[in-house]
Amino acid sequence: MFSYRHAFHAGNHADVLKHLTLVAMLKYLTDKDSALTVIDTHAGAGLYRLDGDMARTSAEATQGVQKLFLGSDLVPKGQITGKESAQGAMQSIAPALQDYLDALASFNNTATASRVYPGSPLLIHSLLRPEADKLKLFELHPTDYRSLSGHIKQLDAGRMVTADCANGFEKLKTLLPPPNKRALVLMDPSYEMKSDYGQVSACIQEAILKFPTGCYAIWYPIIPRPEAHSLPKKLKTMAVAAKRPWLQATLNIGQEPPKHAIGEKPSKLVGLRASGMFIINPPHTLKAALNEALPQLVTLLGRGRGKGFTVAS
Ligand code: SAM
């Protein structure tokens, strides 16, 4: 069985990029009248405690969402515009960043803003319309599946939300095309196994053939590994061959500056510095939204050499 547990990584900079993009897409897609099906092929546990043992051990959220809260202050919508951030670099919060913060705020009260972090299943559920939309979740790790089931049960969402302990790569094709012909697919594997890269491209290739107009959002790590490097290139080739629009957004928080203080322990925060989202059939509003929000993420989360963002389509 896999050793990857998302609780160690919840709320890190990669989650910030992925979930901010997800919220922006859902805001657009649920603004239309017709029903939407969202398929989350790699759901995780659904909800995380940032003050729990696993999150505290890795401390990744301190370089992600917790740093964001400190920089932008979690306050209700409308109160933040025109306000200077703690770093003094921003005059107002980009709408997509504000929407993401608002979505997180609904899981926290302001006093404990960064204690609870919603994973993709609960974040998606919070933005769907109970009377119209459907959410299909897949999670293979038995422990995380148990947590996910418990969180879903508490939502009391009835048939709107289903969760299966099953292989999301295999299940996706059985759900396409969805009955209402509108779907957003989030594919967010851990890439713990090298084979995940090939599975993502094969699965997306098959999905586009079955349902070319679906919106497909794939998260990937930016690491020095040939498979990771070629995955977005393969996705782009597929989108172009299928004559579908695409968008690629990356966020790099850069290298952590060396610590000089005497007696200070070296940081454990090595590891992933950058990640990307590749989207096929993105909402037409997404590029502008990310071009406004990502520079602010770099200001708030950037650490040093290499920090930056890209948005291409
Ligand atoms: N999407 C979640 C979020 O944003 O909150 C995080 C998901 S985490 C990066 C990846 C998850 O996929 C892990 O919980 C892992 O157990 C699960 N997993 C790995 N292989 C899988 C597969 N083939 N099908 C479904 N889940 C899988």
Image: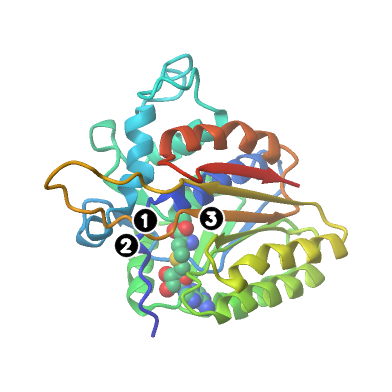
Q: Residue furthest bottom?
A: 1
Which numbered tag is attached to residue 10? 1
Left/right of residue 135 with respect to residue 183 in the rendered view: left
Quadrant housing residue 109? top left
Amino acid type at mark 3: Ser
Density class for disc 2 (Cα within 10 Å; few <14, some 14-19, many ≥20) is many
Which residue has dot 3 on it? 275
Q: Nearer the viewer, mark 3 or mark 1?
A: 3
Q: Considering only vertical position in the picture, is 187 above or below 132?
A: below
Left/right of residue 190 with respect to residue 36 in the rendered view: left
Left/right of residue 176 with respect to residue 272 in the rendered view: right
Between the C-alphas of marks 3 and 1, the distance is 14 Å
Whole-percent x, y for residue 17 in the image: 51, 47
Whole-percent x, y for residue 15 in the image: 45, 52
Residue at point 37% right, 56% down? Answer: 10
Whole-percent x, y for residue 55 in the image: 27, 57
Which residue has dot 2 on it? 8
Q: Is mark 1 within 8 Å of ligand 1?
A: yes
Whole-percent x, y for residue 46 in the image: 40, 60
Callout 2: helix, strand or loop?
Answer: helix
Tags 2 and 3 in contact by the CB under 8 Å rule?
Answer: no
Residue at point 47% right, 56% down? Answer: 120
Q: Considering only vertical position in the picture, is 169 above or below 87?
A: below
Tags 2 and 1 in contact by the CB under 8 Å rule?
Answer: yes
Q: Nearer the viewer, residue 278 or 100?
A: 278
Between the C-alphas of marks 2 and 1, the distance is 6 Å
Callout 3: helix, strand or loop?
Answer: strand
Q: Is residue 129 visible?
A: no
Quadrant in which the N terminus appears? bottom left
Amino acid type at mark 2: Phe
Amino acid type at mark 1: Ala
Callout 1: helix, strand or loop?
Answer: loop
